[in-house]
Amino acid sequence: MRPDASPPSGWTDVTTAPRGTWEKGEAGAVTVSTIPHPVAHDALVCVDAPGMVISGRDGQLRGQGVEGMYHDGRRTLSRNVLTLGGIEPEPLSGHVVAAGTVRYLAMRRFAADTTPDPALVVERTRFADGRERIVVRNTGRRPLSFPVEVVLGADLIPLDALRAGFRPAELPARVAAAGLGWSAPDGMSVRAVSEPAPDTALAATATLRWDVALEPARSWAVELRVLAEPVPGRSGPRAVSGRPPWSEPRVRCDDVRVAAWVDQGLRDLRALLVVPDPDLPTAVLPAVGAPWQLAPAGRDALWTARMSLPLGTRFASGVLRLLASRQGVRSRPRVGEEVGRIPHTLGRGGEQVRYDCAGSTALFVTLLGEAWRWGLPAAETAALLPALGRALGHLTRTLGERPGDFVRLGPAGPAPCELQAQTYEAARHGAALLDAHDLPGGAALRERAEQLAAAFRRAFRAEDAAGEYYAAALDPGGRPIPVASSAMGHLPGSGILDDTGSEAVARRLTAPDLDCGWGLRGTSARTPGYHPLAVRGGVVRTHDTCVAVAGLAEAGHPHAAQRLFAGLLDAAPWFQYRLPEMHAGEQRVEGHAPVAHPLACRPLARAAGAILPVLVAFAGIRPDAPTGRVVVRPSGPLDIGELELRDLRIAGNPFTVRVNRTGQPIVEEAPESLQFST
């Protein structure tokens, strides 16, 4: 849903702030400013897609900002305020105990208490799937009788509308069996039911009430469940049950933060998984991230699946199959569809698929090529070859026929440097797949890729006071845009640079104007108007920094790679190892913490999985399952000490790689069908 000047059809916007003005956005998009984009950087976010809960640390949902329970992009409960004897309990703690579970602790004191100890302790455990368990314990010395009341509210507003600044009025409640219910103007409905049923349910005030009597040391409990019914005729993504579609690695490292980051990242990634298409039940995709984009998208799924390849190819196979099933088959400019193009916005509950990301098609080809190297079964690879051919056709048409042509954002748009690198990498993978399957076109595609690389090195090269770099983009006239950016981090691992260019990028990425000490800034701090909280250019993005680290390590620049990784690793504990989509690009100062960004997704699928390719690059693992060979060649000792990656997968077989403190690799549990060389 795109922001509009009026609230979604049927809802009442109760915003009291002055309405904003229309503004022209990127690529001609129109946005409207109402009250500012809400923030959630300080909130507790628990997610089990397609469900999610956003709250403060007291556990009370007051309908403020984006607080609430959500299902498939709709706020199913905006208000949930608990009182004991007419007074809210005093909060003690609130924290996420698992990706989809949050626990709150509070106390209730009474004027007649004879000790400073609380008379009642309240534990609330809330789950992203819409459940909440409330336990009240009498920790005092006398019997207590009191009403427990929960005031509820629902607006069923789409999260996109909240993000755009709309503040809807709550819908009228009705008494339903064992609880309350609400219905939205578009036909969606929700019920909040309890076990035990309330003694009183009042629709006028949307209140559930239980009359409780507790002896000392006794407890009383109730479970609330929020049950959503989608708009008739629409169905959204389904939750994933069972184990995730990857192996569960065991990581051991002298620096214990590494394993903590991996473990938290994989838990978060599992919580973001959904089944978008009931006709492809084994095709599992991650939602982009919580809280702002809890729906799957093509580019993000491709990046995340690529990161997961060391844990098996099943996840990547599902992503490739689903996106191939929605590949462009005709020209529809309104949604960006072109023959062979891979979609990005996959739609939700009947919404239209949109082909609105320039890099998705190249990433599709690269994922297929890398999955093949990691051992994607031959039958699955063969089934995807027609989609590969169509995608390569789209890439070559987009690139143009002349050696000096570049991939642009639209016919007269800029040519971003990372898009050239992604196209080059995809062309190389595509050529290898064509050759290996006796299909024509590999040599021509490889030649066109080398022409692109040669032209890129000439056209994008730039220099400033800090030294040589590659421009963030070419403008529509073909001139370099003189900005040093983290987009350079996509270059070394793609192979588009020669050795001299790769060394220049390694030096530039570790210069203090880009490396803030907590990761890579989006643009140089020397850029006019630079601001560390600017979403476009100022912030540190976890995914971009990890892409740069892995690429530098693969290209033979271990010191630069480890320096950048050290900053991000130092930031990880400050975020409880749930690395956010982005954080502020403020220069690191002794004694200061990294600054959270108010608009960041946390967790974000691409950030959750980003450490995996870094560790594989540090270990020097280069798989080639089709030839039966795997190279394991780290570039030397690691600053993080000894590193062991156990239960990796290649061609379905487990293996373990250990890099000792002197930088020597040891391969264990290697399958006999593969030849490992160090």
Image (cartoon, rainbow, N blue to C red):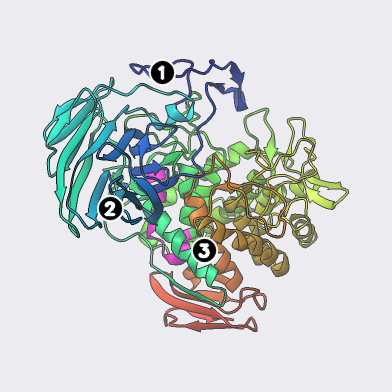
Which residue is pictured at 78% across the width and 40% down the height? 527
Res. 437 in view: no
Question: Helix, strand or loop at disc 1?
Answer: loop
On residue 167, which mark appears?
A: none
Residue 257 in view of the camera:
yes
Specify the segment rendered in magenta. Answer: 308-323
Q: CA distance from mark 2 to mark 3?
A: 48 Å
Please rate how many residues cluster around mark 1, counting C-alpha atoms within 10 Å: few if below 14, some from 14 to 19, many from 20.
Answer: some
Q: Which of pointers 3 and 1 indicates the residue nearer the eye?
A: 1
Quadrant location of residue 525?
Answer: top right
Magenta region includes residue 549: no
Say if mark 2 contacts mark 3, CB within 8 Å.
no
- For badge 2, the amino acid type reads Ala
Between discs 3 and 1, the one toward the N terminus: 1
Residue at the (49%, 40%) spot, across then down: 40
Mark 3 residue element: helix
Q: Which mark is residue 612?
A: 3
Q: Is residue 269 above or below residue 563?
A: above
What amino acid is found at the position of numbered circle 3 in the picture? Leu
Question: Which disc number belongs to residue 119?
Answer: 2
Q: Disc 2 on helix, strand or loop?
A: loop
Quadrant where the C terminus is found in the figure = bottom right
Q: Which quadrant would the N terminus be assigned to in this image?
A: top left
Measured as percent of width and height from the top left, residue 474 is found at 74, 37
> On screen, 506 above or below 544?
below
Mark 1 residue type: Asp
Question: Which residue in the structure is indicated by mark 1?
Answer: 13
